[in-house]
Image (spheres, grey):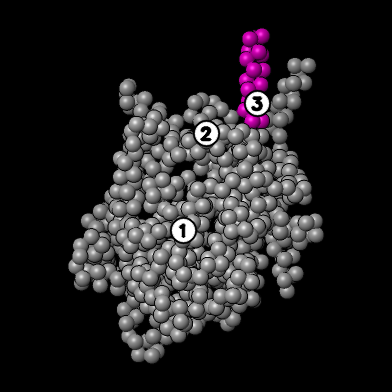
Amino acid sequence: MNLIGDWIAALIFIIIMSYLFIETRFFKAITFVVIGVAVGHSAVVAINTIVSRCIKPIAVGNIAPIIPVIIGLLLFSQFSKNYKYLGRYPIGMIVGVTTGVSVRGMVETDLVNQIIATIKLPVNNISNIIFIICLVCALSTFIFTKKLSKPWSYAQNVGRCTLMLYFGWMFGSRFFMFTGILIDRFRFVLSVFGIL
Amino acid sequence: MPLFKREVPLTFISIIMVIVIFSYFLNIPQLSTASSVLLEWVTIVCAFALFMALVNVLVTHGKKVIDRKEDWYYSLLVIVPMIVTMAVGLIYGIGHLNYQWIMNNVLFAIEAGLSGLFVFYTLSACYRTFSIKNWPSALLVISAIVAILSGTPTGELLHKNFSMISSWIESYPSMAAARGYRLLLTMGGLVLGIRMILRMEKQHLGIVEEEIE
Amino acid sequence: MMGEEQSVLEKLATIDRRVLYVIFFVVLLLANVFKFSLPIVVHPEAKAVYDAIEELHEGSSVIYSCDSDIGGYSESGPPQVAVMNHLLMRPLKIIIVACGEPTGLLVALNVLRDVDQDLLNKKEYGVDYVLLGFLPGEESAVAALASTPFEKLFPFDYEGNILSELPIINEVRSSEDISLVLDAPYGDIAFWMRHWGAPLEIPVAFLMTTGYLPAVMPFYQSGQLLGMVVGSPGGAEYEQLIGKIGTSLQTTSIMSVMGLLCIACMICANVITFFRKEEKNKIGERR
């Protein structure tokens, strides 16, 4: 069974890599299969959650999950023309809670602590001074999207250069992320074919 | 009933957000309890939303198969693996070897393979387009080269001070841009949150201004 | 002579991409076949995670969240496996959850499959470690875990065992009992830092792919993030620290070759552009 699985995985890799040279029906088929399997897995996980958190407790008399179950079932109203608007309640709940939780967490972690970390930098170090200048210039580039007149345009130019350094760093990091994935799969395929 | 179609959902979101946000900053036990209950409930509602993905895919692709639309057989390639995966997952369980076999030899293989394609596209793009035309593009290329050399042991082998140079670039100018980006992203998120509390954001609920009652 | 140079330059500039792909494949094949390994330097970020786990007292509890996608397991897996091996070496209680992607649960199962099985067999499931399962909601799920007892959110573990019957849950009931958070995030998501790190003051460390390192660095620099083990290179560093060398070292070495190939492509692009410009200028001057 493992051997069949390895050969299937190796074949999938070859079909995907063949897309670099020619588009085939097999590649297109694979892009549809992955959707099916991924959605199938999400459904399994969702059903397990619903059964363990809702159905089993309700079956033993614990009615606490009834309200979220009703709200969740309202999602299916989108298939009705007249009652489609009922789906806005569960979506609203998800969006409201997630956004509320994000906002309350962002204030301390992403905003205040980041600003404090910047303010706490000792200014007797030239590198820290460069950091603060680059930060202010990068912020000005983001905020003032229209080109400003001199001397403010110098800040935008410095900001643009700072952003280019960041994008180059991001590019290098992202390249390595995909390279790591490719190397592992390539090594796997070579081992299936007995080359490694 | 425009009230229940539009006003009530928007108010519902505002109330939920106020409870969740203020429970964090104010020490009111009732608010904390309400917030904890909402967080518990939303994990259940999200499970239903995940299940909706299955229903949506079945309806969309099922219609294509039944109506024999163009390339309907590709829709079969969505539905059949989906049903097989679900059947194996629900009968045997997620931890079972059969389910793991499907996940590792199909899902993981395809997703990893598709990710691996990007490497070739990136290398090809580097060859064709990464030419230096002005100062910003020069900095982009230099920074990319420094990031690539510092990400692996190659940089250390090239020059003993390389790690010092690369960590300076990463810790000061690049980090400044990263922090600036993060700060602005946060401020945008906060503005969005305030707009949602004030009922000014409607797109996520599919409410359009000229909605017919 | 000038005509030949022009045609060579033009040919190089407009070379068919499939020829380039074949060259890239050959380089990748040769790098895999001719095995070599480069010396690894341990970065302070990875060392910080190692020290944090080493300094945990006996019986301390760690929550390990697999939020990453299965597609990136090749890159995010090695640091997770290395750190899990370290956790299994120590007398700790490990709670494993998945809060981000549904496939995070599969990542967790793959990590448990790929760790040293001798170490894993010395631990008892339900006593020393437990895999709770997937909790939908992403950030809401992480926030819910921070404020709710685990038993309420996970009445059963991923296999269907009743959680209250597992001994580990008597010792690790909620976030109050957790000493360290290890998160394998999907992207640069700061969920655990926002809801566990800042309000509960529990140290958070990331086990992540290389791609999101630049976006996460500001948190490390500000002290909000304890440390990071990043991608295959990070996995190789961590393997060196714990003394269990795996495949990360070879992957990192091959990544170096691919990195040099990328740099070579960039240099070629600039050299070709430069000489083409020179040629065009010379042709312009002659006219």
For badge 3, the amino acid type reads Val
Q: Is residue C126 above or below residue A11?
A: below
- Examine the structure image and report whether residue C286 is included in the region drawn in magenta: yes
Q: Position of residue C243 (x, y in %)?
A: 62, 58
Mark 2 vs mark 3, foreground winner is: 2
Q: Look at the numbered discs 2 and 3 and tell me whether their residues touch, using CB distance below 8 Å.
A: no
Would residue C113 be seen by someone viewing this image from the given angle? Answer: no
Q: Position of residue C191 (x, y in %)?
A: 39, 59
Residue A90 as seen in the image, left or right of residue B4: right
The stretch of residues the image draws in magenta is C267-287
What whole-number distance in Å separates the C-alpha atoms at marks 1 and 2?
Answer: 28 Å
Label 1 environment density (alpha carbons within 10 Å; few <14, some 14–19, many ≥20):
some
Q: Label 1's element?
A: helix
Q: Nearer the viewer, residue C165 or B18?
A: C165
For badge 1, the amino acid type reads Ala
Q: Are marks 1 and 3 on the same chain?
A: yes
Q: Position of residue A3 (x, y in %)?
A: 75, 69
Label 3 environment density (alpha carbons within 10 Å; few <14, some 14–19, many ≥20):
some
Determine the image quadrant of residue C281.
Answer: top right
Residue B165 tag number: 2
Q: Are marks 2 and 3 on the same chain?
A: no
Residue underneath mark 3: C271
Residue underneath mark 1: C52
